[in-house]
Image (cartoon, helix red, strand yellow):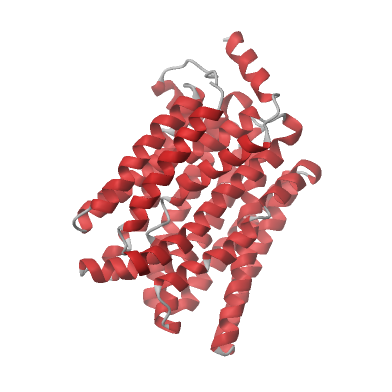
Amino acid sequence: MSALHSAASHSAHTPLSTPVVFTLAAGAGLSVASIYYSQPMLDIISNAMQVGTGAVGMVPMLTQMGYALGILLLAPLGDRHDRRMMIMIKGLLLVAALLLCGFSGGLNALLLASFLVGLTATVAQDIVPAAAHLAPENRRGKTVGTVMTGLLVGILLSRVVSGAVAEYMGWRAIWHIAAVMVLCITFALWRILPPMQPITRVSYPQLLLSLAHLWQQHATLRRAALAQGLLSVAFSAFWSTLALMLSARFHFDSAVAGAFGLAGAAGALAAPLAGSLADKMGPARVTQYGAGLVMVSFALMFLLPLLPLAAQLGVIILCTIGFDLGVQATLVAHQTLIYGLAPDARSRLNALLFTVVFIGMASGAALGSMALAHFGWNGVVALATVAAAGGLGVRLGSRHR
């Protein structure tokens, strides 16, 4: 066991080259993008399969649920097995799941394939701890921030790409294209990453049982997960309903709806800055600033009914940049916080954090659709604002403790 810790300690202080960090960021982005391709295409899929918006709304929800379950059950294996090998295996399984989406013949097949995409797209949650494992301690925040930039840009640009591809090439094409991209980045990661010695040899059941111990042991982890989970409810409620709102209010097609991801990507590009700030001023303070920015950005959308249509679009774009910046900054800071709790359990800590995050994502998608159906866009804005305020309250409460 001491040899394992020695190997882990050595690799953790080996500086990562810029090309390796860039490839890790690209791998995280292309993997996690897979779970968001469907969102701008829901209207097109609904018409193509002749099903209602409520039924087709199950596609992103099941994808998010698969991702949450995969994080909980599969991501901890990164502490027990070579992360390089885990990235390779799960990357290839993700390619297969994406192809199943592209060739699905009906809604039920698409729902099953979407769940499998979510389950295997958790390879992104093997890539982020790998970056933290290989980075020197005094640059861990910046390195994780850079890789998380790739992950968040992948999330946001996935909507831009899928919206345009669906409009001009059909809704199945994006999953075929995604399968090819994931296959290429998986082999690239296999070539550039060093083998990473497992940190623990405990059995898989013991590994899962240790999750409960880590959750009970670290109040910092619980607060980070709860706060980020609430912000994720707001984030997902907005993005899962945006395309439907833009179609109904502005008569925009899926390509335009997807292009709103560019506004979010602009905010996500600040992730390395958030990581550097976490290294300098402390990650806890960054989480408070980030959560506050998310809440204010959503609250500003209550002004939309008072504005002409052109001005409404400008406010939505501005708020999208703001809340995506806040969500990304808070996430990077939360990861920096928890990675310092138990270096020998980073995959499990990351799994617990992101399990709650994607439970929040799935809940946000479902609650956002309900809010839009019963209360209109103001209902979605109210849901997102209250959820973000809850996240800020958790972080301010942790400061007093």
Q: Quadrant of the N terminus?
A: top right
Q: Residue 374's quadrant in the figure?
A: bottom left
Residue drawn at the location 52% of the way across and 58% of the way down? 156
Outermost residue toward the right in this view: 280
Please tell me how many numbered marks the rendered image carries: 0
**Does any portion of residue 80 appear in the rendered image?**
yes
Percent from the top left, x then y, of residue 359?
Answer: 44, 50
Q: Is residue 138 above or below residue 386?
A: above
Residue drawn at the location 21% of the way across and 52% of the way down? 109
**Does any portion of residue 342 appear in the rendered image?**
no
Q: In this view, does 216 lie above or below 63?
A: above
Q: In this view, does 250 lie above or below 171?
A: below
Percent from the top left, x then y, of residue 157?
Answer: 51, 58
Q: Residue 119's quadrant in the figure?
A: top left
Q: Which of 309 and 382 is in front in this view?
A: 309
Percent from the top left, x then y, of residue 387?
Answer: 55, 62
Q: Nearer the viewer, residue 218 or 269?
A: 269
Q: Quadrant of the C terminus?
A: top right
Q: Which of 184 and 345 is in front in this view?
A: 184
292 to the left or right of 178: right
Residue drawn at the location 29% of the way across and 51% of the way down? 101
Residue drawn at the location 40% of the way across and 22% of the way down? 204
Percent from the top left, x then y, of residue 299?
Answer: 61, 73
Q: Is residue 28 above or below residue 301?
A: above
